Amino acid sequence: MSIYMEGILMQMGINILMAYSAFIILATGQLSLGNAGFMAIGAFCSGYLTVRLGIPLPIALILSALLSSLVGVALGIPVLRIRGFFLVLGTLGFGETVRAFFINFEPTGGAYGMRGLFGTTFEMVLLTVVAVTIGLWRIEQSRIGRAFDAVAADEDAAQGAGVNVRAVKVMAFGIGAFIAGLAGGLSAHHLLYVEPGHFSFLVSAMAVLFVILGGMQTFWGAMLGAVIFSLLPEMLRFMEDWRLSVYGAALIILMILRPNGLLSRVFLRNIAMKFQF
Amino acid sequence: MLAQQLVNGILLGSTYALIALGLTLVLGVFGKLNIAHGDVFMFGAFAGVAAASFGASLALAILAGIFVSAVVNVIIERSCFYPLRNAHFLAPMLSTIAFGILLQNVATQIWGSDPSRYPNIEAVTQFEIGGILLSSVHIVILAVSFSVMLTVDIVIYRTKIGRALRATALDPEVAGLLGVNTKNVMFITFLTAGALAGVAGVLTAVVYSQISPLIGIRQGLIGMVAMVIGGLGNLRGAMIGGILIGLVEVLNDAYLDASYRDLIVFSLFFGFIILKPNGLFPQPSGNRS
């Protein structure tokens, strides 16, 4: 495999993880436009651990994802109070606050960030994506997955049926932040450096767009969205300088044509039926 | 010293107020968030700079900015909001994010990614009033932005069009039944919001002289901060919120450190949403969250 191809596939893997992190929060009927903040925490924390303390990358990744998850739970609790636009704006504000925090945080290099990160391999990204996919698949099949569905469909009814709605919503933020933290750590060690400018709100927005366009009913939709929209800019290379403009236009047109995403559960079930006898 | 900082803060804040006003108009009337609003502002700024570099006067440059931004905003309404009017409330919002990406890249292709400069304005005179330094350009900018805000306020609260707009904001269906042409209201709202962003864009280009295709991302976010602090959906609140943010930024730069600017503004924003989501001036009726 060429280095070029490997680079694209690694970026795709990181995008899939970001889409998953947005998906798991959307699966409880919430929305986070601040996942770049969790990604930043994963990236800076793992970078600090590997560069400054010399801790091996896999351990650093897990530790920083756990820290990110903790922050996710800490964000999940206050945002229980808000919904709709306030949730959109509040999570957006969180992401920007984290970015601004790292601009002023000297231990991780302030606005210049850190150099000298390395160690993300293709196998490592692949393994993480497979492990997280299996984890999400297990969650979807389990009681927790059904609780997520119930909360997304009707909070009051779910509460009435004995689902602990608050715990489910906070848990979604914790899991989403964990996955975004992994994505951030892998991405920073793939790019060989990390700086606060990497984690603008556009990163969070793209993660949500992947999910919406792929289909937000199942995590396969999130994966499909991330795969298609990581490859699209590469396929548009022949457009040269205009490719990102065309990319933006393609997203708008797709949104008009399929506002509910490409994959739905009914569609998946129909496919599954065809292969059953 | 402090008086000078306050004047600078109001100057900066008045452009934020214009951005927040446009965002609030769209959110108040439709209950929809236009995330590309900052990029509409950026397009207007570039249009003004382009006009000025062809020798247009400041007034003509502002008109060019108004025209381009208004047209772009109407295109956003046609491509992101109208086709998705019955979809989930997230769909049009995410669509405008894609539109923002489109605008940033189109601007890069037309004007380049290096910062563009507004040509120096000749015949600038400096005034000193009670120890406060003010240039004639600053006075023009304050005059333009405050007269635009006053005009919008009068139109919204004193005229028939304004009444139609406020009725649509309260309940589009009932307003439609009572004879308001809600389709027209939609058009006028986006046109006005775009025009306001265009004015803000050209004024910002004149004061800070440098603009780049990515300038709109932060400006749009600051507009949202001002909108929330002023009370989501409250037009006068949004204007006051914009000026407050301008003051906070300038005072931070003067007495603390410029690098704390975003940290202070965005933690204030986050704090408001969690602790006081209705802002300083809660909208009495029609809470659209």
Image: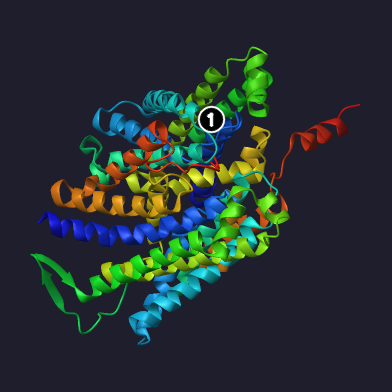
SS class, disc 1 = helix
Left or right of A232? Residue B50 is left
Residue at 58% of width from left, 51% of height from top?
B169
Q: Position of residue B96 (x, y in %)?
A: 55, 55
Residue at 57% of width from left, 64% of height from top?
B160
Residue A94 in which image quadrant? top left
Residue A126 vs residue B180, the one in the foreground:
B180
Residue with the mark numbered 1: A127
What residue occupies the far bottom of the structure in this picture?
B55
Residue B60 vs residue A57, the one in the foreground:
B60
Q: Position of residue A277 (x, y in %)?
A: 91, 26
What residue occupies the far top of the structure in this picture?
A162
Q: Amino acid at mark 1?
A: Leu
Asked whether residue A99 appears in the rendered view, the answer is yes
Residue A178 vs residue B193, the one in the foreground:
B193
Q: Examine the rendered structure and indicate whether residue B204 appears above or below residue B32.
A: below
Q: Position of residue B264 (x, y in %)?
A: 27, 42
Residue at 68% of width from left, 47% of height from top?
B87
